[in-house]
Image (tube, rainbow, N blue to C red):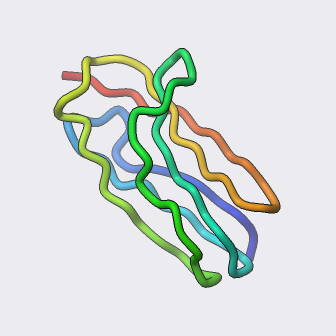
């Protein structure tokens, strides 16, 4: 198992499910950022066991556009693009 990060659907309106996989136990931060790198929301900020997880993200209060979601652990940082189309 390795680190992975994905979401479905993408583009989305107004919700999407962000999935991530952890090969080892550790502290995990999952957050959504705007185009300028400003944090919109932190979805996860806690110790997680190795395994697969899913988190629902609701962008209903945001403007249409491109956002990023970022998984941060002690071993890696992964960033992927989200497209919100209203």
* Residue 35 at x, y percent in the picture: 51, 17
Check the image and name the residue furthest to the right: 75
Please identify the quarter of the rendering in which residue 56 is found.
Answer: bottom left
Q: In this view, does 77 lie above or below 20?
A: above
Residue 81 is situated, as x and y percent measured from the top left of the image, at: 53, 32
- Identify which residue is drawn at 29% across, 36% down: 12
Q: In this view, does 3 lie above or below 48?
A: above
- Quadrant location of the N terminus in the rendered image: bottom right
The answer to whether residue 38 is above or below residue 23 is: above
Residue at x-position 47% and y-position 72%: 53
| Residue for point 51% across, 32% down | 68
Depth check: give the residue in front, 10 or 56. Answer: 56
Q: Quadrant of residue 43?
A: bottom left
Horizontal side, residue 31 vs residue 65: left or right: right
Q: How many labels does the image show?
A: 0
Q: Which corner quadrant of the image does residue 62 belong to?
A: top left
For the C terminus, the image quarter is top left
Picture coordinates of residue 5 (x, y %)? 59, 55
Residue 4 horizontal/vertical position (percent): 65, 60
Please name the residue shown 24% across and 44% down the image: 58
In the visual, does 77 lie left or right of 13? right
């Amino acid at each position: 198992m390795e680190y992975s990060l994905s979401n479905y659907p993408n583009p989305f309106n107004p919700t999407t499910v962000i999935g991530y996989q952890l090969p080892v136990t550790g502290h995990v931060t999952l957050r959504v950022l705007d185009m300028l790198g400003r944090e919109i929301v932190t979805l996860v900020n806690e110790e997680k066991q190795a395994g697969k997880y899913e988190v629902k993200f609701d962008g209903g209060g945001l403007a249409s556009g491109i956002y990023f979601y970022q998984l941060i652990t002690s071993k890696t940082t992964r960033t992927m693009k989200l497209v919100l189309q209203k």
